[in-house]
Image (tube, rainbow, N blue to C red):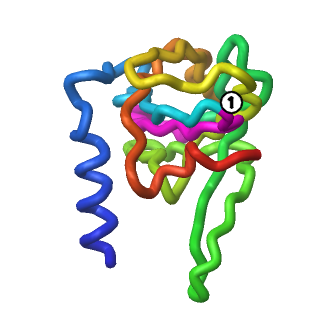
Amino acid sequence: MKLMKYTALALFLTAGSSWAADYTLGQITVTQPTTFETAKNTKVGGGYMAITNESKTDDRLLEVRVEGIPRIELHLSATDANGVATMTKQDGIEISSGETVTLMPGGLHVMFMGLGDSPFKLGDQIDATLVFEKAGEMDVTFDVRARTAGDHSGMKK
């Protein structure tokens, strides 16, 4: 199961490596901010990326802001031993010193809520600001890719 998870992670991070950029703010690097296209009437979408903290102190991703999206939360998806999936709002995402945290389908992710009549379309780019507790604010662009299995961007909320 662990091998499957790492294989899925590797495929996710390399699937569109020619699209997404890397961003650096001090000792924090964000790799490949990505979201998936959403259906016309879908009101939510997920955001994914890898965040590396090269500093000597821990940091936290506190929030994500996008103009025109009324509500954005940080979430953790998990499946229990009985196969029941849950999604829990997080007050922040810890990025420990010297570590990389990967936001990906089925785990930690950004939840864009209230998309209204503006679904994410393949090839679009979503300008966003990531707010870190210590590093400060970082402007990034989420590239919109084709939806894949395991992504919950098609969920209505």
* Camera-side residue of 32 and 120: 120
Q: Where, quadrant-wise, is the N terminus in this rendering?
A: bottom left
User: Could you say where residue 108 lies in the image, as x and y percent from the top left?
Assistant: 55, 51
Is residue 60 visible in the rendered image? The answer is no
Quarter residue 119 falls in: top right
Residue at 56% from the left image edge and 51% from the top image edge: 152
Query: In this rendering, is residue 40 above or below 88?
Result: above
- Asked if the magenta segment contains residue 11, the reply would be no
* Camera-side residue of 48 and 37: 37
**Residue at the outermost bottom position:** 82
Mark 1 nearby-residue class (10 Å; few <14, some 14–19, many ≥20): some
Query: What's the magenta bit mostly, secondary-structure-wise?
Result: strand
**Magenta segment boundaries in residue numbering:** 41-60
- Which amino acid type is shown beneath numbered disc 1? Glu
Q: Tell me the element at label 1.
A: strand
Pointer 1 residue: 63
- Asked if the magenta segment contains residue 42, the reply would be yes
Residue at 23% from the left image edge and 30% from the top image edge: 17
Q: Is residue 121 left or right of residue 131?
A: left
Query: In this rendering, is residue 62 above or below 83?
Result: above
Residue at 71% from the left image edge and 49% from the top image edge: 90
Residue at 58% from the left image edge and 73% from the top image edge: 79
Q: Is residue 147 left or right of residue 69?
A: left
User: Could you say where residue 40 lies in the image, as x and y percent from the top left?
Assistant: 61, 30
Q: Is residue 78 left or right of residue 103?
A: right
Is residue 10 visible in the rendered image? The answer is yes
User: Could you say where residue 85 lies in the image, as x and y percent from the top left?
Assistant: 63, 70
User: Could you say where residue 39 lies in the image, as x and y percent from the top left?
Assistant: 57, 36
Q: Is residue 137 left or right of residue 15?
A: right
